[in-house]
Image (cartoon, helix red, strand yellow):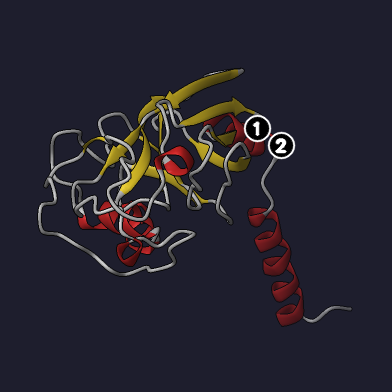
Amino acid sequence: MISRPIFTALTLSALGAALTVPSDAEASRYHRRHRVYEVVITNLTRGQILSPPIVATHRPGFRIFEVGMPASPELAAVAEDAVNAGLETLLDGSSRVFDRQTGGAPIPPGQSAALEITADRWATRLSSVGMLVVTNDAFFGFNGVKLPNWGSRTYRAVAYDAGSEANTEDCDDIPGPPCGNPGVRQTVDAEGYVHVHAGIHGLADLVPSRHDWRNPTVQITITRIR
């Protein structure tokens, strides 16, 4: 015979287990509310490495950058030195962002990286940024492109200049190879606003035949997988 206290404990334990196991109907509702996407980012340049990209799903109207306006300090850190932490924190703390993922490695020329990201019925847009690392402050940017309800959508993006650093093309100021000098900024003569990048002109150490590009710079393919 089971004593009353033990019986009560067993009953509560069983009830708790029953409450924490979702029913098939609940699981089905969850999957209807939450969509899963594969995002494939391809580097279309010949001589630029892309830093590990940040990807976010969010509600319409949210933007990581505005062309013609100053870059946020968080975006400038990505564009100047491929430092993602500040922008990751900003996105993670926004009520308009549903999910944020970051690539695990740089993307060499001609190669791709794939990430999975989730969205709900209100988060119908996707944005992504990453640095062109053999530059002073160039970045690629997809700003609020539409997620597909089903199937795939493909977009291409130009390279933008964050306008937060002068385009010296001097290895003393550039983090990526062959330079290797992160954390050095030359702000005198910086443009002060985000604009389409003018490319590499051979002003100092960077060689246009090796490091310049022609837009578009990056391709992104978004496929709904669940």
Task: Tell me the amino acid under the disc marked 2.
Answer: Asp
Residue 102 visible in this rendered orientation of the protein: yes
Quadrant (top left, top right, bottom left, bottom right) of the N terminus: bottom right
Q: Position of residue 16 (x, y in %)?
A: 65, 62
Q: Which residue is mark 2?
A: 24
Task: Tell me the amino acid under the disc marked 1.
Answer: Ser
Q: Position of residue 151 (x, y in %)?
A: 61, 18
Q: Residue at x 44, y 28 (%)?
A: 121
Q: Are marks 2 and 1 in contact (CB under 8 Å)?
A: yes
Is 115 or 188 nearer to us in this picture? Answer: 188
Picture mark count: 2
32 versus 175 height, above or below:
above
Q: Which residue is mark 1?
A: 28
Is 32 or 137 nearer to us in this picture? Answer: 137
106 displayed left or right of 97: right
Is 16 or 204 nearer to us in this picture? Answer: 204
Q: Which mark is residue 102?
A: none
